[in-house]
Each structure stands twice: as structure tokens, then as C-alpha cells.
Image (cartoon, helix red, strand yellow):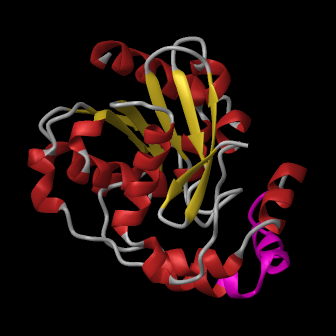
Amino acid sequence: MPYAKNGDINIYYEVEGEGPPLVLHHGFSGYLDNWREQGYVEALRDSYRLILMDARGHGKSDKPHDPEAYAIKYKTGDVISVINDLGIETTNFFGYSYGGRIGYRLAKYAPERIKSVIVGGAAYGTANPNQEQRIKMLEGGPEAIIAQLEKLATLTPEMRENILAYDCEALIAILKATWDDIEADLPDMIMPFLLFVGESDPSFPGVEKTSKSLPDATFVSLPGLNHLEAASRIDLIIPHIRQFLARVN
């Protein structure tokens, strides 16, 4: 199985398709197969070399329990380690939610390696949304998480299996890690951005504000959709992604 090495941490990744490279970075508590389950891989692999990765603390990647192990330099370094492992000089990047917040940091700290950035459901952000509530839920373990989520929605067998595989201590460490304030750096991020967000997503105002601070940003609002719904409506999102990537590549 393909692993990239960032220091002593192993980052798992998979590659599908041919064409210009596009790194896909999932959200908090997700894993790389989310992109297949939601239909992004099938929709994009005919035109792009898709690089799916498990973020540290998730999936098949290593899961340190120290919040310091989730400093920005390590999370951005994991992405660079993966493209280095593949011999890729520059790549397009697509991150949703937590993955999108990492995308903004890549634009700041590794601009020479990032051709364009697609962000779904995330402003640049310095605080983890609902941090204390999330930590409390994780402290109850996977079964408690499933019980809470089943009050809100029907979980598929795949979703239940994913939650049961959580390393809750690692996820708590991620939530306790700090984010740097990059608001003043946004005007210097000159690569093209595509930002999309559901209008019912609590992050909507922040994403819209972020788009106005970026020199080359396309902003797409998705009426009536919340954070989770916006991620799965590929019928609405993929046309914007294809148009954007065709322009920048």
C-alpha cells in the first residue's frame, strides 16, 4: 500500500485517473473513501489524476495522540510529502471543511507547489467549530457517537463502520491543536480559488467574506443546503469544479 513519509508519520494515499493532478483532502473525522462514496472520483477521474489521502489521525494514516503533532506545518507537510512521493512539482488541491482550512494554509506556506485551490464549506478559520461539544462526544467513544448521530439522521452501514474505526484520542488531539490567523495573508494568495458553501451552512458568512479577500476567487453559494448536504450534491458542484479546473489547467 502506498504511504508517504513526513518525519516519522506515515500518510496513506491512493491514486486514480489520468490528467493534471488534483489532491482530494477529506473533512474532519473522514477518510479518503468519502470521495468515492459521494461520487467525486467517478465524476473526475476521466480528466484528472486524483490523489486521495487520509489525513494524519484518520483512516490508514498514522494517528498520534499529541495535539502538537497536528500543528499547521505538519498538516500542510503531509500534503507536500504525498506529492513529493509521486514526483509531482505542482498540483491542484480540493479540500472540504477541515481539508479546506488546510488548503488555505498550503496557499500561504507552499504557494510554489499549489496551482489552484478548491474549498468547500470552510472559511480560513482560526478556531475549530463546536470544539468543546465535539470533544465531549468523542470522549464517549464510537458507540456513543453513533447513538448521538442516529438521533439526527439514518446512518448507512459504511458510515457506522467508519465511526467504529475512529481513534477518538487522535481526533480529540486534532481538535485541541491550534490554527494560525492568516486573514492578513489572504490578499497575497494569488493562485485561483473556487469556494463553494451551502447557504444554510453556519460557515456561509465566513466563506463569503474570505472570497472577497482573495485576489482570484470564484464564489458559489448553494441555496437551501447545510454543511453535510453541500458536500454530497455533486450534481450542483461538479460543473463548477470542471469549469474552474479547465480554466486554471
Name which quarter of the figure residue 145 lies in: bottom right
- Spot occupied by residue 14 in the image (x, y as percentages of width and height): 65, 37
Name which quarter of the figure residue 134 lies in: bottom right
- Spot occupied by residue 49 in the image (x, y as percentages of width and height): 53, 22
Report if residue 160 lies within the magenta region: no
Rendered view: 153 above or below 80: below
Q: Is residue 91 visible?
A: yes
Taking the view exactly as shown, the residue that stands out farthest to the right is 157
Identity of the residue drawn at 33% across and 31% down: 90
Rendered view: 100 above or below 71: above
- Spot occupied by residue 118 in the image (x, y as percentages of width and height): 38, 36
Q: Report the magenta stretch's main SS.
A: helix
Identity of the residue drawn at 72% across and 73% down: 167
Residue 191 relative to residue 82: left or right = left
Quarter containing the C terminus: top left
Report if residue 139 lies within the magenta region: yes
Q: Nearer the viewer, residue 203 or 107?
A: 107
Residue 245 relative to residue 235: left or right = left
Residue 186 relative to residue 227: left or right = left
Identity of the residue drawn at 36% across and 74% down: 127
Q: Which residues are magenta?
A: 137-153
- Spot occupied by residue 52 in the image (x, y as percentages of width and height): 59, 39
Identity of the residue drawn at 36% across and 48% down: 103
Name which quarter of the figure residue 58 lies in: bottom right
Rendered view: 151 above or below 211: below
Q: Nearer the viewer, residue 202 or 24?
A: 24
Rendered view: 189 above or below 236: below
Count of marks placed on residues? 0
